[in-house]
Image (cartoon, grey):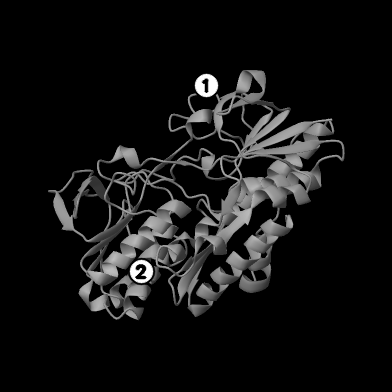
Amino acid sequence: MAHVVVLGAGLGGAIMAYELKDQLRPEDTVTVVTKDPKYHFVPSNPWIAVGWRKRDDITVDLTSAMAKRKINFIPVAARQLVAQENRIELIDGQSVTYDYLVIATGPELAFDEIEGLGPDGGFTQSVCHIDHAEKAEAAFQMLLKNPGPVVIGAVQGASCFGPAYEFLFILETALRKAKIRDKVPMTFVTPEPYIGHLGLDGVGDTKGLLESEMRSKTIKWMTSTRVKKVEDGKMTVEEVGDDGVAKPEKVLPFVYSMMLPAFRGIKPVSGIEGLSNPRGFTIVDQHQQNPKFKNIFAVGVCVAIPPLAPTPVACGVPKTGFMIESMVTATAHNIGNLVRGKEPDQVGTWNAICLADFGDGGIAFVAQPQIPPRNVNWSSSGKWVHLAKVGFEKYFLRKLRQGKSEPFYESLALKVLGIDKLKEVKKG
């Protein structure tokens, strides 16, 4: 009998627990440890921030959802992983032991790395968490009453650019619907070397598609840009040339700003030699298994992935939903093998499928594999993307509430996009 613990219950951790129940033996047990008994569907946070969704619309009670699958559930935050002793210390004094551990914690948001950044004690908004999105919505209501310049984007070291573009265009749509778009100059600020880079060196024609959208909507942009500091109503930035030389600083005035931060690993699993890298992300091999602690696996945003190539300003590599699904499926199979005395043999495809909603349209892209060169390098735009994103939200929340583990992106790839074999789990 084996005890498998999943640390974290976000997009990756929740479906990780479900897939483990499908792959393990009847006598094996699964326990989920997470700081919040409620799951909030993060991809909907940009809609929360403009009042198009409410908290209850995107919330799942994990206590009842896990009980349906007979998964042990401990809604208490971790204090420290003691990897050498195969246990996790929790903040309430509990100590949870495991035979196998899957780290699926998501990231810690590094707002503190830039003066004045973030919604808690800073001057910028965020859509990374439901609490942040609700604060952003309150600030949006103030913007409607007192319109003025807006600055949206991501800071240096960020690795999740899709939500920045999504919120930029969702906000633009909301402002048009409120009939005050003409009173709100908009600027997009990003460390990417060009618009549509996305931390992936672009996918298909994301550069052309996104630049065209910005031009048609009169949105200015700044690329290869570092945020130096943020003060009340102004952001100090510097652009960096291809030669690495910084240009003179600029001050961007704003009455509203949403800037995505850089990510790092959470403290309970950081600073463990052989397990985490200097940023606290968990090191894994092709089987999602840590090379030093063979009974520890990791999936999702907490996984360490090196940047594709040097850029004038630091850009991370995103972990998209489809990529996370492939990590989860491979990990469930590999732990299933281990409890039966076999070796791990499954490798996630690490392909990328993304639906970027713009409020009344959007852009979709497929990268197979995510890191170039690619077999599939495709992007497209249209109103259908918005409808697909709404469908994704409803499907995933229903799946989570019902305790099902079938992957969404496989269906999207095969049935909607018509691209075959994107979800294939490989042997290696």
* Residue 350 visible: no
User: Residue, x 58% and y 65% (percent of image)?
Assistant: 393
Location of residue 74 in the rendering, given as x and y in whole percent from the top left corner: 66, 38
In this rendering, which labeled residue sits more in front, label 2 or label 1? 2
Image height check: is 77 above or below 155? Answer: above
Question: In the image shown, does 307 or 408 lie closer to the viewer?
Answer: 408
User: Residue, x 60% and y 66% (percent of image)?
Assistant: 392
User: Which quadrant, please, contains the C terminus?
Assistant: top right
Residue lying at the far left in this picture: please name it. 248
Question: In the image shown, does 57 or 239 lie closer to the viewer?
Answer: 57
User: Which quadrant, please, contains the N terminus?
Assistant: top right
Query: Circle 2: is it few (<14), some (14-19), or many (20+) Cα within 10 Å?
Result: many
Residue type, label 1: Glu
Location of residue 33 in the rendering, given as x and y in whole percent from the top left corner: 64, 37
User: Callout 1: helix, strand or loop?
Assistant: loop
Residue 416 image-quadrant placement: bottom right
Residue type, label 2: Leu
User: Residue, x 59% and y 36% (percent of image)?
Assistant: 76
User: Callout 2: helix, strand or loop?
Assistant: helix
Image height check: is 382 above or below 185? Answer: below
N-term mark: 2 or 1: 2
Location of residue 259 in the rendering, given as x and y in whole percent from the top left corner: 33, 53
Residue 273 got which mark? 1
Q: Is residue 160 left or right of residue 118?
A: right
Residue 171 got which mark? 2
Label 2, label 1: how far apart the Cα atoms are: 43 Å
